[in-house]
Image (cartoon, rainbow, N blue to C red):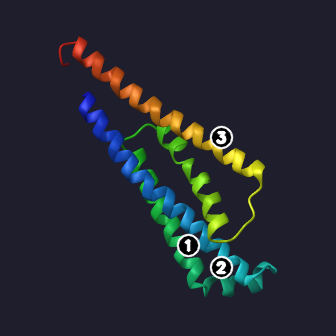
């Protein structure tokens, strides 16, 4: 794969993973909202209320969209890049929980979010370096 193709593939992967991350986080917000409205009880009485909840179905649909985008990215990108990159969903989930669900997020959790964010940035940078190295190797081999 040429350096230009690798760079295009990286952009394509990022453009697919960003909506996957946001769909996943939004889906979780809808599921959490729905389940808090339904409440907890034993499984049997819970099932009809779950099935009748449009909020739960919408959240589930968003999670399916996220999954389809995730597996699509796996069809062309390295697993060792895609999985750490989608770890950004943890960050977005915490931000959404704080903003939309008004959850109180402790300093310890925010610190964890910061550490995950740093990890995601490192993974993104490593993929760019990999593309650059492959491009240099192709140039050294005369374009082959």
Q: Are marks 2 and 1 in contact (CB under 8 Å)?
A: yes
User: Which residue corresponds to mark 2?
Assistant: 34
Crowd rating for badge 2 (residues with CA inside 10 Å; few <14, some 14–19, many 20+): many
Q: Position of residue 23 (x, y in %)?
A: 49, 63
Q: Quick one: 113 or 7, which is closer to the camera?
A: 113
First in residue order: circle 2 vs circle 1 = 2
Q: Quick one: 74 or 136, which is closer to the camera?
A: 136
The CA distance from mark 3 to mark 2 is 30 Å
Q: Secondary structure at mark 3?
A: helix
**Residue found at x 72% / y 83%:** 38
Classify residue 15 as left or right of residue 66: left
User: Which residue corresponds to mark 1?
Assistant: 59
Q: Position of residue 53 (x, y in %)?
A: 61, 85
Regarding residue 44, the answer to whether it shows in the image is: yes
Q: Secondary structure at mark 2?
A: helix
Crowd rating for badge 3 (residues with CA inside 10 Å; few <14, some 14–19, many 20+): few
User: Which residue corresponds to mark 3?
Assistant: 115
Classify residue 62 as left or right of residue 95: left
Q: Is residue 56 above or below residue 73?
A: below
Count of labels in the image: 3
**Residue found at x 27% / y 28%:** 3
Is the C terminus in the top left, top right, bottom left or bottom right quadrant? top left
Crowd rating for badge 1 (residues with CA inside 10 Å; few <14, some 14–19, many 20+): many
Where, by quadrant of the figure, is residue 65 drawn? bottom left
Q: Position of residue 55 (x, y in %)?
A: 58, 81
Q: Quick one: 133 or 92, which is closer to the camera?
A: 92
Furthest residue in direction front, as rendered: 107
Regarding residue 1, the answer to whether it shows in the image is: no
Q: Quick one: 27 or 64, which is closer to the camera?
A: 27
């Amino acid at each position: 794969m040429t350096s230009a193709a690798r760079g295009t593939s990286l952009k394509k992967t990022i453009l697919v993973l960003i909506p996957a991350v946001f769909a996943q986080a939004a889906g979780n917000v809808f599921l959490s909202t729905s389940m808090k409205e339904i409440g907890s009880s034993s499984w049997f009485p819970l099932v009809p209320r779950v099935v009748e909840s449009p909020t739960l179905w919408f959240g589930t649909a968003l999670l399916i969209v996220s999954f389809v985008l995730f597996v699509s990215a796996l069809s062309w990108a390295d697993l060792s890049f895609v999985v750490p990159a989608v770890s950004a969903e943890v960050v977005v989930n915490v931000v959404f929980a704080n903003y939309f669900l008004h959850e109180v997020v402790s300093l310890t959790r925010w610190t964890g979010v910061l550490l995950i964010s740093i990890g995601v940035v490192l993974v993104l940078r490593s993929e760019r370096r990999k593309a650059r190295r492959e491009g240099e190797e192709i140039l050294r081999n005369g374009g082959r």
